[in-house]
Amino acid sequence: MGIGEDAVNTSSASTSINGMTGGEQRRKELGDFLRARRGQLDRDEFGLPPVARSRRTGLRREEVSYLSGVSVTWYTWLEQGRDTNPSRQVLDALAGALRLTPAEHSYVLSLAGFAAPAPTEAPMVIGAPPEVQRLLDALVGYPAFAITTDWSIVGWNPAYAALYPHVSSVPDEDRNLLWLVFTDPYVREMLPNWDRDSRRFLTEFRAEAGPRLGSPEFATLIARLQEASEPFRIGWASRDVQGFSSRERLFHHPKVGDLLLEEHRLAPVDHPELHLVVYTPTAEADTRERLSRLVG
């Protein structure tokens, strides 16, 4: 047996209406998918000779076995949809050998009941991609902005600039949501519930930051905040963690007064390193009219 292989599962299962159980359908799909991807590979890219004068695509099962370290018998069983329990190690090895994309790799893992692979460290984002900026601009009348994994603000729409006019003038290294909440007097004045809101921001940031705290960008941000803000220093030392949830936020704007807005976060599927934060007016009578005056 090759790496990470489990025994063939000979246990019986109840049959579904179409004659196949859910497990049988997933095993068949896994086998069909592996066979299809194997057949689409360019042999030249692997330094392999053509198997026939007119056939330069497709690897043999024996070649996939050699490249992955999975025994040819075990791999054959997988393609045949046998009642087996492949380990994650086997599937990861096959994903590498077959040069699957991240989406294809996740799909193969899901068919065997495993979670998607851990995301690789995303490169630092300098600005919002054009399509993300267009989406922000399309949210006419609703303050919205985009943040990266370290909460740097990399894009915003005119409504958000009306809510927080400093966003375009602060230095790039300070245009970070957490930094602004804890250091900008204008933001502090805009948040009547600053003590509660700032602590909530901190606990949400910590909940998301765990895998990235060792990166230089995060280390620098945390060190700067600890030096600049005693409330941040105290809150960070508590190690409180809380996941994000959509909620009402009260702002007091110097031009139009109180605004009771709902805060929502969206994650573009094709840009997992970004989150879009959108504020929408609540049913509170004056907020919609005041927001219209502010952004109009």
Image (cartoon, grey):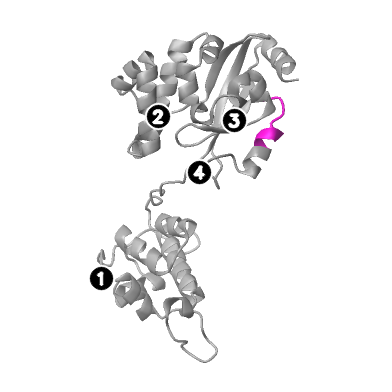
Secondary structure state at the residue bearing disc 2:
helix
Residue 2 is labelled as 1
In the current view of this chain or complex, which residue is farthest to the right?
A: 296
Secondary structure state at the residue bearing disc 1:
loop
Residue position marked by numbered label 2 in the rendering = 221
Q: Position of residue 71 (x, y in %)?
A: 29, 74
Which one is in front, 65 or 165? Answer: 165
Q: Position of residue 58 (x, y in %)?
A: 48, 79
Residue position marked by numbered label 3 in the rendering = 145
Position above or below: 51 against 229: below
Per the rendered image, the range of residues in magenta is: 135-142
For marks 1 and 2, the one nearer the N-term is: 1
- Name which quarter of the figure residue 127 lies in: top right
Which residue type carries mark 2? Leu
Q: Are marks 3 and 1 in contact (CB under 8 Å)?
A: no
Q: Is residue 24 left or right of residue 188?
A: left
| Nearer to us: label 3 or label 1 | 3
Measure the C-alpha gap from mark 4 to mark 1: 35 Å
Q: Is residue 201 left or right of residue 165?
A: left
Q: Position of residue 220 (x, y in %)?
A: 37, 31
Residue 272 is labelled as 4
Measure the C-alpha gap from mark 1 to mark 2: 46 Å
